[in-house]
Image (cartoon, grey):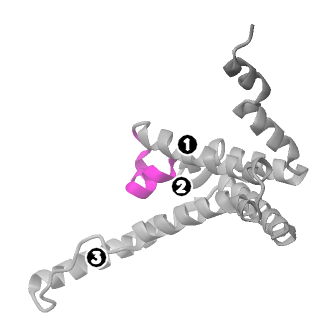
Amino acid sequence: MDTPSNVQSADSPTVLANLARAAAQLETAGKFALLCIFFGWFFADTLVVTLGSLQHGVRFYDMSAVIADPTRLFFGIQGPFHRIMFGVVCILCLFAPLLPHLRGGRANWLAYLAPLILMVICGGLLYSRTSSEFIAAAGDAGSPGSHLIRFANDLVRHGSGLVARHISVGVGGYLALVASLVLAQRGARHFRNAPP
């Protein structure tokens, strides 16, 4: 004899069944865009560092480690903590476009913007970290120490300009960006057409 909890679990769909049903409701272009973003973030290089004949690629799921320490672009990512934590964030952003198919509501269509927003935030943070002052200036602007700090910051800024010439956006970055824009456009169209 079934207990009420067994009957309820048999009648209610599981989380995986709900996700599969929501994924089946995605348009073909949305599915293809999500697949391209997944490939671009996890299997292709987002940034490529070229020094002479050496090339080193950084994937998007390593971006939090690079934002924390931009020198990791050149010396590689160490430790799995950043990869695991940011990888979870990336997966959640990839599942976000399923939200309007799981729950009703016009605002849920904005979840299609999640991959693009994550890429824009990471790009902004990386730019901010690599273009800010490396050494804090002293309070007394006329002191010799202040002049030395200003000289050091100018030297580092000039050196980072030289280094920036050796960094380019990889195939994964372009692929994920274009697919994120397509996904965002489709979400915006559904948001406009959804009843209030």
Main SS, magenta residues:
helix
Q: In screen coordinates, is 194 left or right of 166?
A: right
How far across and how far down the image is residue 123, in percent?
A: 54, 65
Magenta-highlighted residues = 62-78
Residue pointed to by mark 2: 50
- Tell me which numbered mark, 3 or 1, is placed earlier along the sequence: 1
The quarter of the image holding the C terminus is bottom right
Residue pointed to by mark 1: 88
Residue pointed to by mark 3: 153
Of circles 2 and 1, which is in front? 1
- Tell me which numbered mark, 2 or 1, is placed earlier along the sequence: 2
Q: In screen coordinates, is 44 left or right of 47?
A: right
| Amino acid at circle 1 | Val
Residue at image location 76% in from the left, 57% down from the top = 179
Residue at image location 14% in from the left, 84% down from the top = 139
The quarter of the image holding the N terminus is top right
- Tell me if mark 2 has few (under 14), some (14-19) or many (20+) residues whose alpha carbon lies within 10 angstroms of its own: some
